[in-house]
Image (spheres, coloured by chain):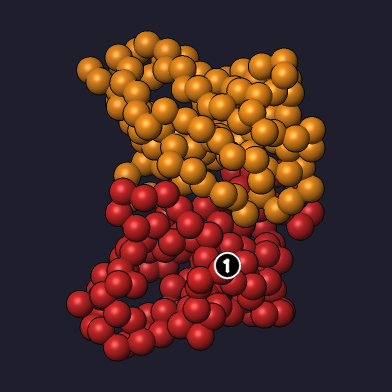
Amino acid sequence: GAVVSQHPSWVICKSGTSVKIECRSLDFQATTMFWYRQFPKQSLMLMATSNEGSKATYEQGVEKDKFLINHASLTLSTLTVTSAHPEDSSFYICSAGTGISGMNTEAFFGQGTRLTVV
Amino acid sequence: DAKTTQPPSMDCAEGRAANLPCNHSTISGNEYVYWYRQIHSQGPQYIIHGLKNNETNEMASLIITEDRKSSTLILPHATLRDTAVYYCIVRPRVSNAGKSTFGDGTTLTVKP
């Protein structure tokens, strides 16, 4: 099946620094990708929709200036956590649907990135 | 998207069938039922989806009631590696599959 790959799998950074997480669709083109965040013992929460060639759309309560999303190609979306703080420590997951605009198909998720801010 | 209700946890003996229920009483006619699972510290994995007919694939079977207000995911012969959180999600037909509203899911523990 289709594969979505995230990098890095885990990262530890100092408070105040920025961290970039990559999400790639390896064998299909994804005009739209999605970013989720998952805190310990909680479910996945959608953060934003990443649109190739245009601005991302953010869910209510998610700071767009803190979580910068770039979707410069049909196979790559990046999430940059700027000026990270310990409360940003979480499990970040991307997803994409295959098929025409990802509709009516299964979704594929990246393996997730564990961010720890110290 | 329609809300789903799942039991928070279930146990299953290894080798036995695991039957995971999901209630989606407010589902509308244009919404699919999807099932994903998440093994600890990994991204979710697609299992199966359906509209109104029962579905089966190499991983599981999906039984949807005639009124579509509930469904059951069946893992026919559970193994220890099936221990995971299972999410039942309802999504409109015309929507991007990558965008889903996750509930709390059911933590399935398969025991030897």
Q: Residues within 10 Å of mark 1 (few under 14, many from 20)?
A: few
Task: Find residue A72 and report its image quarter.
Answer: bottom right
Q: Secondary structure at mark 1?
A: loop
- Residue B86, image x, y percentages: 45, 34
Quadrant in the picture for residue B77: top left
Seen at 48% across and 57% down, the residue is A45
Task: Residue at 65%, 20% (x, y): give it.
Answer: B64
* Residue occupying image coordinates x 34% and y 58%: A39
- Asked if A16 appears above or below A11 in the picture, the reply is below
In this image, A36 relative to B90: left or right?
left
Q: Disc count in the image?
A: 1
Residue B60, given in percent of the width and then of the height, sits at: 53, 23
State the image coordinates of residue B96 (x, y, percent, origin top left): 70, 53
Give the drawing colour for chain A.
red
Q: Is residue B80 left or right of residue B3?
A: left
Q: Is residue B76 found left or right of A41 in the rendered image? A: right
The x, y position of residue A117, in whole percent, is 26, 75
Mark 1 belongs to which amino acid?
Glu
Residue B63, quarter of the rendered image: top right
Task: Report which colour depicts chain B.
Answer: orange
Residue located beneath label 1 in the image:
A59
Chain assignment, label 1: A
